[in-house]
Each structure stands twice: as structure tokens, then as C-alpha cells.
Image (cartoon, coloured by chain):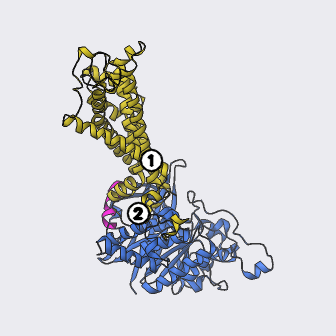
Chain colours: A blue, B yellow
Amino acid sequence: MEALLKIENLRTYFYSRSKQAFVRAVDGVSLEVGQGETVGIVGESGSGKSITAMSIMGLVSTGPGVIGGSIHFASSRGQLNLLQDLDAYVEIEEKNGRVMSVNKDESGWQKFSERMMKDLRGKEISMIFQNPRASLNPFMTVGEQISEAIRLHTSIKSPLEARERTIYWLEQVKIDSPGLRFNTYPSAMSGGMCQRVMIAMALSSEPRLLIADEPTTGLDATIQSKIVDLIEELKIETGISTLLISHDISVVSRLSDRVAIMYGGAVVEYGPTDLLLDTTAQIKHPYTAALLASIPSEQKIRDKAELQTIEGDVLDTINVPPGCRFYERCNQITPDIEFKCATQHPELREYTPGHQIRCWRFAGLTAR
Amino acid sequence: MKKYSQTTVAIGDFSSLPFWQKYSTVDLIYVAYGLLIVVLVLASYVAGMFDLLPHDPQQINMDMLMAPPATEGYWLGTDFMGRDIYSRLIMGIQAYFLPGLLAISISLAGGVLLGVLSGYVRGKLSTVITYFTNLIDSFPRLVLILLVVAAFKPDIYYIMMVMGITGIPAVATAIANKILFLSQKNFIEAAIALGLRTRVIILKHILWYNCRALLIIQATLGMGEAILLETSLSYLGFGVQEPAPSWGNMVQSGANYFLQGNFWPSTAPALAILFTILGFNLLGDGLNNILEDRRSR
């Protein structure tokens, strides 16, 4: 199956002026989203999930931003590399595989990327954000905002037809009395309703790929599950491919076909959802195992067992250690691999077909 | 009760209500009063154009010096040269209105441009703009005006141009701050992600929908300020020059006779200034409330 979106070795860095060092927000992410597939990205705050999404959309504006990798997207114009010619704008000085300095022609790249993204953004790749109310213009009625998107991206240009289409989409996202809701301002809607409006707006252009950046964060638990239901339904109905970013494993497990676990700007485990989130599986990245263990199960709640946490803090992406990024928090280091863990960054390796892990523990197992 | 039982509306949908139910009565009164002032100003131009004034405002009548109000044919009285105060009052606003509009246009156009550049584009340009606005801001406005007047001539249009330029920093800062505030909410980012052009985002989403109230306030306040500025300059003798009437020079010339008991030559224009400035300020206030009403946050 031809992949719709294929990210290879994406690197997005920021420069921290106060610390005189790079923040390696995204450091070598590779991912694939197939046609009609939903891929979830899970990770703690600061693991680079959102920046990955922003990099795909070309929304990273602080320097140096995206500095390497490729993003292949099967658009209606054919296969495109969204980061095509990036190398011409970026000069990277590397030492022992670590980026020491970056020289990027930011405005030149922005201009180039802008031309590339112009017909894709919002039309073929749509995005919904967390905090839906802040994502809507407070002074425009929701109807106006959706019809603006429709008139921009579809063949419907007349205001009246756009209005009809808007009401159709409001119905699709299950907003009651959509005709009356057309003239409502975002301030008069609940967060869940605003997210429905955002979803309607994102889908109204009938995009190929939907990027959902923490779509349920900040909503009530009951609303969260309703939004997830809605996305699930629309996914089946429209067959849209989705890149779902969340730190909520339950959301990801319900919606995704495949999951990528991110830690410290890199994917540490990538594979089919049921395999990855199966707590009994033997081959599992220690970080994934720790994440899964930290979800309180019904049994644990009944026993009043203490909640499990992952010791330590999220990786400081400024001073990235030379070894495994999870080394300091890992609880599965055995003496025979400890030296490697501390000094060498493991590769993402495939163990069973489609299931990749970045850990020295399984290095002894033969790949494939 | 009856008022609301007639129509069924979705919560938050005010668009189907008639406008007098949609907005607060106070705001509507403000706007109505402000519009009345604007109409009167326009009426003054009509009167001037079609010669509808009771007297020529510049015609000196030596037989009628300092006629008190309610004199036959001169219901607001005459000034120390026997000129009809009522006619001069009507024509006096014309000394401000167009020049004031010029000043407002300059400060709004310049302010919006610089504000958008520093708020939206940011980067090094923003620093340069901050230096520029600080430079203008740190210059005493009156001194600058006197400089211009001395270099050219005491013309109200030159004065208003200076006023317009010195008004740029206030507008620019307000717009830049508004944009910074808006970019904390991420709807601008969402608009970019939606594929909207930068032009549309800036003009429609930022300036029209989110800054129009602010701009209206700035514009109406600017009109009041223009009138006050000319009045103060008239006291220094640099305002609109006699014999052309302006409320400022009417107050100034009338003030000499105030203590002799001839209060009317300066009181009438002073009251006109008061009610006109009040009108423009209330107009801005009312429009602001109506445009912002129930929508933000």
C-alpha cells in the first residue's frame, strides 16, 4: 500500500538564546501514515509530538525550525516532498553525529515552503487543535467561519450554497439545530461544541489527511469520549487518514491502527496498536511499558494500590545524552547492556514485521 | 416576559433579534447622540454650500457690536466686531472636521501599518518600529506643531498633519498589543493552518473583526482631540486665523470681554466644543460596546 504521508528522519530544532544551545524538539522522527489509516503519536509533554505536526504543516516559525529530513505526501498533484530542497537553505555542521551549528536561510525557506504548502494547507491537510475555543475567531459566527473555509477550498463559491454546505457539516458533526447555530458566536458554545465546529471546518474541505493535535485535551471526560466517538464515526464515513496526537493512551487505542511512542524528540516504538498497547507483550520498549503501567486499571483502583509513575523528569532536549535518551529513567537496564545504554544511541529496529523498537535490550534478538 | 416569548432563538444567537433588543439602551442613546452631532456637522457644510446661513460669518457690522443673545436677527448675539455668532458657530466646525479627518486618517493608516508590522511580522523590524514610535512619542507635540507653523505658516492642515503623525505611536502600540494578545489564543495559527492567505488573516480576521472597535474608538477620540488642540493653539494665536471662524478663536477673542459681563461670545463656542467632543466620544464608546457586545471570550 502506498503511504499517504511518509516522514523520514525529521529534525526540528530551536535555538535557546539564554542557554546558548539547541533544543532538539524533534530529532530524527520517521513515521508513515497509510491511506485511510489512523496513526497515533503518544508521548509526554515536551516529547516533540506537536512540533512534529507543526513541521508537517509548515507552521514552525521560530528559528532554526525544520532543519532536516523529508516529508513525502501523496497529494492530488502527485507525490510531493514537503521538505524538498530544504538542504539548499540549511547548512549543518556536525560532530560525531551531533549538530553543532546550523545556518539556515529562514526567510528564503519560508518563502519556498509557503509556495509548496499554499494549496495543501487546509485543503489536503487539515488540522484541529487542542483548546478549540481559542482556535476560533471570537468575533465571527461559527457559520461564517466554516463557510469561509468551504468557499476557500471547495468549488462552492456562492454564499448561499456555502451556507447550505455549512449546515450540512454542522449536521455531520452532530450539532443540534444547525440552522440556528449558524449564527452563534464561539463564546456562546461549550468547548465540546467548539471542537465539533473545528472538526466540521477541518473536514469541510474534504482533506486527505487530518492532523488532530490533542483534540480532546481540555474537555470534560464525558465530552472527550463523545468527541472520540464522533471522530471514529467520521473516520469510518469519510475514510480519511488521520495523524492523531495525544497523551491520552485510551483515546489513541480507540482510534488508531498504528501507534508511535515518542520520547525526547524521537520515536522509541512504532507498530500496530494492539501489539504495542498489549500489556502482556514481551518485546516492548521500557518507556512504553512504564507508560502502560502508569494507567490505573480497575483492579488497581479496587485494591487502592498506589498509582505508578515513571521516575525522573522528561528528557531535557537541550543537553541530550550521548546514549539512550531514556537511560536515566529506565528500570530495565541489565548489567551487560548498561555500557551501551549509557554511551550509544540505539537504532529503531524492526523485530516483528511492522513493529520497531529503539532499545538495546532487544539488540540480541535477530531482526525480522 | 412578552418581549422574549415572541421569538425562539438558539442560545447565543442574537442575529434574529431587532437591533434595539440586541444592544443596551444606553449604548444606543450614545450612538444616536453621536450621530446627531455628525449630522449637524454635515448640515453645516450643506448650509455653507447653499448659502443658508442667516448672515455672512465674516461680515463686520459696526452698528451691532456686542449685541446680546436674542437680539432681533442675531439670536445668539454678535461679537466685538458685530459678526453674527450663530453663523460663525455653524461655520466654525468646518475648521476642524476635514482637517481632523486628515489627522485621524494619518494616525490610523500609519498606526495600523506599523502595528501590524511589529505585531504580526515581528523580528528585527519590530525593534526598529519601537524605536521610531518612542522617538515620536518623546517629542512634545506642541513644540513640534510650533516648529512646523514657524517653518511654514499657521495653517490648520499643517497642524493636523503633525497631530496625525504624532498620533501614530498610540495606534501602533494598541494594534501591536492586540495582535500579541490574539496570538496567545491560537486562532491565528488555526487560520494559517486552514490555508487562509496572510492578507485575509490580517485584513479580515485581525483588523476587521478584532480591531475595528479599537480603531473606531481611536478615530472618535481623535476628532475630539483635534478640536481641543486647535482651541489651545488659538490661545497661543497659532490656530485658525481670523477672520475665518473657528470655535477656538471665537473662545479666545470672546474671552477678552468675558469679565465685562459680555459672556456670550465665548460661552456659545465653548458649549459647542463641549457637546461636540462629548458627542464624538460617546459615539465611539457606544459603537465599541455594540461591536464588542457579548462576543468576546
Residue B57, image x, y percentages = 24, 25
Q: Nearer the viewer, residue A20 or A334?
A: A20
- Looking at the image, which residue is at 38% across and 84% down? A2
Residue A124, image x, y percentages = 36, 74
**Count of numbered badges drawn on the protein:** 2
- Looking at the image, which residue is at 43% across and 75% down? A179
Residue A206, image x, y percentages = 38, 78
Q: Quadrant of residue B42?
A: top left
> As shown in the figure, which amino acid type bears the numbered disc 2?
Ala
* Figure quadrant of the N terminus of chain A: bottom left
Q: Nearer the viewer, residue B224 or A215?
A: B224
Q: Nearer the viewer, residue A57 or A163?
A: A163
Residue A47 badge: none
Q: Is residue A271 visible?
A: no
Q: Which residue is mark 1?
A: B29
Residue B185, image x, y percentages = 50, 58
Q: Is residue A348 visible?
A: yes
Q: Nearer the viewer, residue A301 or B3?
A: B3
Q: Which residue is mark 2?
A: B191
Of callouts 1 and 2, which one flags the residue occurring earlier in the amino acid sequence? 1
> As shown in the figure, which amino acid type bears the numbered disc 1?
Ile
- Please tell me if label 1 and label 2 are on a single chain: yes
Q: Secondary structure at mark 1?
A: helix
The magenta segment is A104-119
Q: Is residue B222 magenta?
A: no
Q: Quadrant of residue A108?
A: bottom left
Taking the image as shown, residue B240 lies to the left or right of residue A32, namely: left
Taking the image as shown, residue A299 lies to the left or right of residue A193, namely: right
Q: Quadrant of residue A327?
A: bottom right
For the stretch drawn in magenta, the main secondary structure is: helix
Q: CA distance from mark 1 to mark 2?
A: 37 Å
